Amino acid sequence: MNRLSLAALIWLLLAGAGVAALFMSARGQFTATFDTDARILHRVLSQRMEQQEAVLNAVDALEPGMDAAALAGYLDTLLRPYPQVVAVERCAAQGCRVLGTPAETPPALASTISPDPAVNWPEGGGPLYAVSRGNMRVWVDARRLTGALDSGAAPLTYTLFQPNSDIVIVAHTPKTAQASTTLRVAKVLGTALQPFTIRISRPVPWGAWPWLGGVLWSLLTAGLTALVWRLLDTRRAAQRALMDERARAGGVVQAVSEAIVALDDAHRVTLANPAARAALAHPLPPGTDLRAVTAFQATLSQAPFNAASFWDSPGPVALPEGLTLLRNGEAVQVEGALTPLRGTDGELRGRVLTLREVGPLQRRMLEHLEDGERRVREHEDMLAHVSRLSTLGEMGAGLAHELNQPLTAIVSYGQAAARLLDEPEPDLARVRHAVGASVTQAVRAAQIIIRLRQWVRRAPSRARPTDLVQAVQNVLTLCRADLNRLGVSVVTAYADAPLIQADPVQLEQIILNLLRNALDAVQDTPDPVIELSIVLEAGGWKLSVLDNGPGIAAEVATRLFTPFTTSKAGGLGLGLSMSQTLAQGMGGDLSGANAGAGGAVFTLSLPRLVQEAASG
Ligand code: ADP
């Protein structure tokens, strides 16, 4: 059944019950009035019957001593108050004779004189009948019995019957409107001589019922039902909205990772989310006193935790920073707050406790951070490895190039020593110098090979605080012979204590490459000059190697640092590319350009050592 038909049914029941009650009450009234009227009628008729009998008794008593004329004159007076008595007859054996002037002419009736009183019915019935006693007979017109009673607003219909018979004496049927129902009663008149049956009825016309009242009641109940229904509907919608809202809020509370516990005004749990049950290691059923299952503990460095003032705080209060929560014997660092909930009247309704474990959050963040760093490191290592492998081929050729110099030097020192020893008086000091120099070159060659192997194997470079000036000096010493041979002027300008974090052998290799290229460049220059300078700039140390050679050839200028770029007949084109790779490995870089006054300048930039940078 849908809700509308339910409302209609309720209205029907209400309206029906009311209308039924109205009509029942009306019917009760009709019946009561009818009963009263019927009783009155019965009494009146019974009295009239007794009047007739009294008249009869009177005339019977008078008759023997009075003549007819005197009796007739007396009758006029006697009968005046009794209009229903229409004639009086005196009977003898020859027949009956009317005395005086009758109001109606009585019908002929067989003489049935008897000492006992009796009712005599004319032949063929009719409204006239006689009551007789001895010689006297009193005629009654039943139509005149109730003449005065019909003045009532609701007339009665009645029918008088002869005793124990269906023979109608008189029927009184006033004109009435169409009847909706008829009230009826049958009685026997209360006289000894004329116990006639009277059937009284009253039709109830349609218009007598409380139609207007019924309609008004139905309208009223319809209006009331609609109103109540509307109110209920509104309430139901509001309730549904409230439930929805509550479900949504509940869902949110259940979903959040923060522990949330709602309490009533006596700190008893009304709601706890899964995070709260986990944080407190307690199922927290509703009604639990939260103070009894929550143990906060201050650390030694903190002021003692005042639980009473925390739990009963009148306003929002946060847990002191660094506070721990005892859980299964373990102290867990937490943060959170207790917030009072007040009704619109400002009265305290309850509280909400929120808790968050600080440890896991910090740990998770650290783990994320470390994880990220590790991944970046691995990635960088991988890139470096790949890049080293890709240059492995170029390294092979580079190795030959790098070893060529020391090997050539060893060969020439060896030849020189042999030549000196062949002399008749060998100069042993010079021989020792030549042998020593060739040993130095051999050691250097070995170091190059070792370094290269380590580099390819992803061996970490042996970076350590290194003096850039010292490295330059070492390289100049190595190249001294060639510089002298070509008559090159070396100009140096060094800043103070240029310390860098670098592997010294790699650093010297870079410088050696630059110096050797400069030497190659100035080979045909009339007054060859090579300038070496070390300056401190914002980005770090800059070592420049400037020569006054012909400058960088146009065909190689754009790919100086690409492997196998060379303009020399016997060149491999690997020195610069390898040097740049090494410089970048140290956190620096290598660049080259033509100098303004002709010649070329190559600049090695290297970051400052951190300690040194901090101190100066
Ligand atoms: P290689 O010396 O075997 O040719 P490098 O990588 O050392 O290989 O040098 C590459 C090229 O860069 C040289 O061939 C030369 O053309 C050019 N170059 C290097 N240094 C200078 C310089 N100081 N002056 C002019 N050109 C230079």
Image (cartoon, helix red, strand yellow):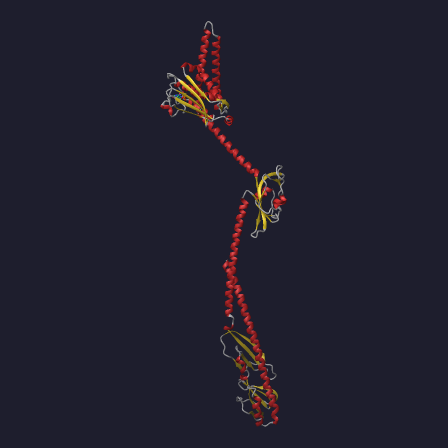
Residue 163 visible, this angle: no
Q: Nearer the viewer, residue 456 or 411?
A: 411
In which quarter of the view is residue 595 placed? top left
* Residue 109 percent coordinates (x, y): 55, 89
Q: Quadrant of ligand 1?
A: top left
540 displayed left or right of 111: left
Q: Nearer the viewer, residue 262 or 338?
A: 338
Q: Residue furthest top?
A: 424
601 displayed left or right of 249: left
* Residue 30 percent coordinates (x, y): 55, 74
Residue at 53 percent of width and 67 percent of height: 19
Q: Residue furthest left?
A: 554
Q: Nearer the viewer, residue 95 or 319?
A: 319
Residue 481 versus residue 75 in the image, above or below: above
* Residue 234 percent coordinates (x, y): 51, 56
Residue 592 versus residue 177 in the image, above or below: above
In which quarter of the view is residue 64 placed? bottom right
Q: How many marks?
A: 0
25 displayed left or right of 472: right
* Residue 535 percent coordinates (x, y): 45, 24
Residue 360 visible, this angle: yes
Q: Nearer the viewer, residue 12 or 496?
A: 496
